Image: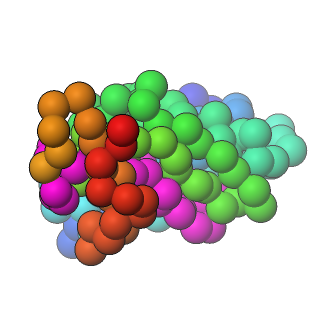
Amino acid sequence: MGMIDISVEDGVVTLDSDVPVFGLKRLAGVPAWWVPGSRDVVNGLGVIPPEEVNDDTVKDAVRLALEKGPLVDPDQIMVTTYNAVVTLHEVLPAQAEREMAEFDPWYVFGVDRAVNEILVRAGEGYGDQCPAGRWALREGPAVVPARSACAP
């Protein structure tokens, strides 16, 4: 126990072995997804001894994945979980960051669904420009207005 066996074939990364805590199993596949060319990650890790799995452990693993990722500021994202469904909240400065933030929850073992409710400040990604000091909230892949154009 302690060493993870990793194999790669045709872009599919397979992780095998036993690990001492479920959090390690959850996070082990995240860096494998970050490698260019990865098409799938098969997480065959066992946990000895078995541990209780709950929403708090899922949330902790997603927070850690966001913190380890180089593309978004995790301090700007609120994470909630319910029955293995992860929801991301808050406002980010660019559409690209919003889209990148959604990937990390999917990479965490045990996440059944990821809901991206992150909003984007207009003018720093997609959306309308607002006067200095004001911002518009935009959401969704199509950048649909979430509220009136510019905040007071």
| Quadrant into which the N terminus falls | top right
User: In the image as oriented, which residue stretches furthest toward the front?
Assistant: 152
Visible residue check, residue 40: no
Query: Residue drawn at (70%, 34%), measured in percent from left and top?
Result: 21
Q: Give the left or right position of residue 151, taking residue 129 as reference.
A: right
| Quadrant into which the C terminus falls | top left
Of 2 and 60, nearer the camera is 60
Q: Give the left or right position of residue 142, taking residue 68 as reference.
A: left
Q: Residue 130, located in which quarter of the rendered image?
A: top left
Q: Give the left or right position of residue 53, taking residue 127 as reference.
A: right
Query: Residue drawn at (36%, 43%), measured in percent from left and top?
Result: 151
Residue 82, given in percent of the width and then of the height, sits at: 75, 56
Of 112 and 151, nearer the camera is 151
Instruction: Indicate yes or no whether the magenta region holds residue 116.
Output: yes
Q: Is residue 41 above or below residue 125?
A: below
Of 5 and 27, nearer the camera is 27
Q: Is residue 134 above or below residue 86?
A: above
Query: Residue drawn at (21%, 72%), measured in percent from left and top?
Result: 10
Q: Residue 75, located in which quarter of the rendered image?
A: top left
Number of numbered discs overlaid on the protein picture: 0
Visible residue check, residue 86: yes
Residue 145, given in percent of the width and then of the height, sits at: 34, 66
Instruction: Indicate yes or no whether the magenta region holds residue 111.
Output: yes
Residue numbers of the magenta segment: 103-128
Q: Is residue 8 above or below residue 75?
A: below
Q: How is the image coloured?
A: rainbow
Residue 7, given in percent of the width and then of the height, sits at: 34, 55
